[in-house]
C-alpha cells in the first residue's frame, strides 16, 4: 500500500545567518531540518509552527515564512511505501537556545558559508544549495575546490603610502571571487578607520587589536609602549590562528611588520605562524620595516616607495583616504 503525505520543513535562520540542523535519533542518523507531516485539517502554517515549537522550542512567526523549495521523495516503512511532498520554508528566528525533543539527539547552527556536514540528508543538501543561490552566498563546496593555488605569503612593506590599502584591495577582490577572508588589525585600536564600515557591510570578518593611539581632543599620536600593547599583539596572533581554524582562504595581518619592529611580537612568532598555517591559506602581512627573515620566506614582496606624500606639503590625514 502507498501512503502519501505533505511534509512542512523549515530553514530556521538565526541573527548570525546560521541555519538550524537537527541530528535524527532514528533511521540513518543524519542531519535534518525541523518540520513534520501535516495532519488532517491542519493549515500548512499551523503544522509549521507546531513542529518548530515541538522540535526546537523556538518561537517563530509562521506568517513570515517564505517558501523556498519543494521536493518529492519516498521511503519504505513496515512494508509500505510512503510518498512525501515536501515544502521547504525559511523563517528568521531571534533566539539561538534550542530545546530538543526526543526525536533528535543534537543540534547544530550551520554557517551556510561553510561546507555542509558529511552526514546530512540529500534533500537538505539540495535546499541549502537553493538557499545559498537565493541569498547570494557562494557555494561552500565550490569555494573549497576553488582554493587551489592559494597558500602563499605576501608582504607589503616600505615607507610609501599604499600598503594597507593594497592589502584591503586584495581582500575585497578575494571576497568578490567567493573566498572567505579575515583581517586582523595589529596595534590599530579606535573606531576612526573608515574601511571597517565597508567590511561590516560586506560581512567580512575582522578583529581589531591595540589601543587607540590618537587622542580624540588633541589629535596627537601616542607613541608609548605599554604592557597592554604586548598583550594586545598576542591577542592579534591568537585571532590569526582562529581565522586559520575557520577555513579562511585569505588572512590579512595589517601592521604586523611594524609590531615586530616595535618589539611587540617577535619575528620567531611570526615565522612560526607562517610555518604552522594551513597549507591553502593565503597570508598577507603589511607594515613598514619587514625583517629580512620574513622577506626570505615570502612569495611576494612589494616595497612601496615614497616619491611624494602630501603630508609633507602640510595636508593632514583625510577621512576616507588615509583612514
Ligand atoms: P594606507 O593605509 O593609506 O595604505 P600605508 O598602510 O601604506 O597607508 P602606514 O604606514 O600604515 O601606510 O600609514 C598609515 C597612514 O600614514 C596613512 O594615513 C598614510 O597616508 C600615511 N602615510 C603613509 N606613508 C606615509 C609617509 N611616507 N609619510 C607620511 N604619512 C604617510
Ligand atoms: Mg598601513
Image (cartoon, grey):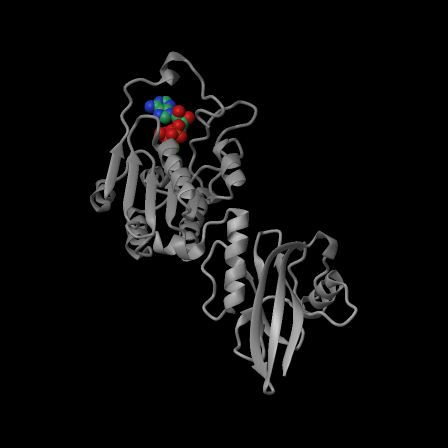
Q: Quadrant of the rendered structure where residue 217 is?
A: top right
Residue at horizontal 53%, vertical 40%? Answer: 200
Residue 96's place in the image compared with 199, above or below, is: below
Residue at far right of view:
41
Decide which of 158, 9 is in the foreground and name it.
Answer: 9
- Image quadrant containing the N terminus: bottom right
Residue at horizontal 31%, vertical 33%? Answer: 288
Residue at far front of view:
1
Residue 198 coordinates in the image, percent (x, y):
50, 35
Residue 148 in view of the camera: yes
Tag count: 0
Residue at horizontal 45%, vertical 18%? Answer: 316
Residue 200's place in the image compared with 32, above or below, is: above
Residue 95's place in the image compared with 287, above or below, is: below
Residue 233 coordinates in the image, percent (x, y):
42, 45
Residue 111 in view of the camera: no
Residue at far top of view:
313
Residue 94 coordinates in the image, percent (x, y):
67, 54
Apparent side of residue 65 relative to residue 152 in the rendered image (left or right): right
Decide which of 322, 248 is in the foreground and name it.
Answer: 248
Decide which of 43, 316 is in the foreground and name it.
Answer: 43
Residue 24's place in the image compared with 232, above or below, is: below
Residue 56 coordinates in the image, percent (x, y):
67, 67
Q: Quadrant of the rendered structure where residue 308 is?
A: top left
Q: Quadrant of the rendered structure where residue 287 is?
A: top left
Residue at horizontal 27%, vertical 19%? Answer: 307
Amino acid at each position: 500500500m502507498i501512503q502519501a503525505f505533505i511534509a512542512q520543513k523549515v530553514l530556521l535562520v538565526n541573527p548570525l545567518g546560521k541555519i538550524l540542523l537537527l541530528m535524527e535519533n532514528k533511521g540513518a542518523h543524519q542531519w535534518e531540518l525541523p518540520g513534520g507531516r501535516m495532519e488532517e485539517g491542519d493549515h500548512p502554517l499551523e503544522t509549521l509552527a507546531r513542529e518548530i515549537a515541538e522540535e526546537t522550542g523556538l518561537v517563530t512567526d509562521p506568517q513570515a515564512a517564505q517558501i523556498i523549495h519543494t521536493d518529492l521523495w519516498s521511503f519504505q516503512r513496515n512494508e509500505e511505501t510512503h510518498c512525501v511532498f515536501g515544502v521547504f520554508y525559511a523563517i528568521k528566528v531571534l533566539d539561538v537556545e534550542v530545546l530538543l525533543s526526543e526525536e533528535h539527539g543534537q543540534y547544530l547552527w550551520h554557517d551556510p558559508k561553510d561546507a555542509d556536514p558529511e552526514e546530512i540528508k540529500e534533500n537538505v543538501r539540495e535546499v541549502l544549495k537553493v538557499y545559498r543561490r537565493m541569498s547570494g552566498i557562494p557555494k561552500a563546496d565550490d569555494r573549497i575546490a576553488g582554493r587551489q593555488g592559494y597558500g602563499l605569503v605576501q608582504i607589503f612593506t616600505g615607507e610609501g603610502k599604499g600598503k594597507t590599502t593594497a592589502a584591503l584591495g586584495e581582500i575585497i577582490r578575494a571576497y568578490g571571487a567567493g573566498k572567505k577572508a579575515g583581517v586582523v588589525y595589529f596595534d590599530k585600536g579606535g573606531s576612526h578607520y573608515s574601511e571597517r564600515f565597508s567590511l561590516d557591510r560586506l560581512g567580512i570578518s575582522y578583529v581589531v587589536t591595540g589601543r587607540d593611539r590618537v587622542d580624540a581632543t588633541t589629535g596627537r599620536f601616542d607613541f608609548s609602549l605599554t604592557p597592554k600593547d604586548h598583550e594586545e599583539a598576542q591577542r592579534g596572533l591568537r585571532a590569526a590562528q582562529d581565522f586559520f581554524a575557520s577555513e579562511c582562504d585569505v588572512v590579512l595581518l595589517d601592521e604586523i611588520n611594524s609590531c615586530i619592529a616595535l618589539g611587540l611580537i617577535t619575528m620567531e612568532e611570526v615565522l612560526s605562524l607562517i610555518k604552522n598555517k594551513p597549507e591553502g591559506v593565503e597570508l598577507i602581512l603589511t607594515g613598514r620595516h619587514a625583517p629580512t627573515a620574513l622577506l626570505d620566506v615570502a612569495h611576494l614582496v612589494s616595497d612601496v616607495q615614497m616619491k611624494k606624500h602630501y603630508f609633507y606639503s602640510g595636508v593632514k590625514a583625510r577621512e576616507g583616504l588615509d583612514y
